[in-house]
Amino acid sequence: VLIIALFERIQPSHASWNRSREDVRTDFTHAMVSMVALPKLLEVVQTVGLLSLAIALTEMVGGTLWPHEWALFPQLILAMLISQFGEYWAHRCMHEIPFLWRLHATHHSPERLYWLNAARFHPFDTAVGYTIATFPLILLGADADMLLLYSIWVAVHGMFQHCNIDIKLG
């Protein structure tokens, strides 16, 4: 996070976006709700809620379906592929279904782009995205370490996508 914030100052895509528009408090509040409190609450609710279903699935197949024997990096790649598939379709629905767009529009409301507005989401938008992304991972038996690594990747990737850094990626 500090590296992204630093590079926004050193090599901004738009220098004018580095000036606050009285939006830091709003974005910080969204970050605390959408990236800290709500995901933690949903993780507990999903884990408890899915526990009986996950146990039944484990007993049915004789173990979890998650490939715990794989090395960490391939597991993370699999977690990203599974979670991003659902998240992609949820995001499309957020843009195409008017009721969902009214909620998702919060994310598109900032007048400038910088690392902290990666977290500007309506709580319902966060809940839908997080649930769709993590539900299959929990159900398949991914462990807490994998969910943590996945969450870190999502947070850093989101900040990188929304940062004000002049980067040419081809």
Image: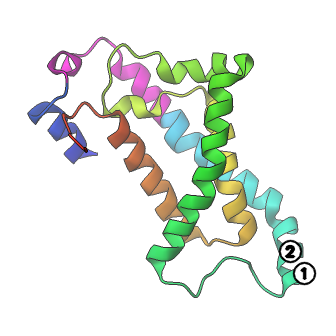
Q: Decide: marks 1, 2 in contact (CB < 8 A)? A: yes
Say what amino acid the circle numbered 2 marks.
Answer: Leu
The magenta stretch is 14-31
Placement of 33 over or under 147, stated as above or below: above
Q: What number is the disc on residue 47?
A: none
Q: Main SS of the magenta segment?
A: helix
Q: Is residue 10 magenta?
A: no
Residue 153 visible (yes or no): yes
Label 1: state its secondary structure: helix
Distance CA(mark 1)–CA(mark 2): 5 Å
Q: Please indicate whether residue 39 sits to the left or right of residue 76 in the image.
A: right
Q: What number is the disc on residue 57?
A: 2
Count the labels in the image. 2
Camera-side residue: 117 or 43?
A: 117
The image quarter in which residue 4 lies: top left
Among all residues in the image, which is located at the extreme left?
10
Identify the residue at image location x=54%, y=36%. 34
Placement of 43 over or under 98, stated as above or below: below
Quadrant of the frame with the N terminus: top left
Q: Is residue 22 magenta?
A: yes
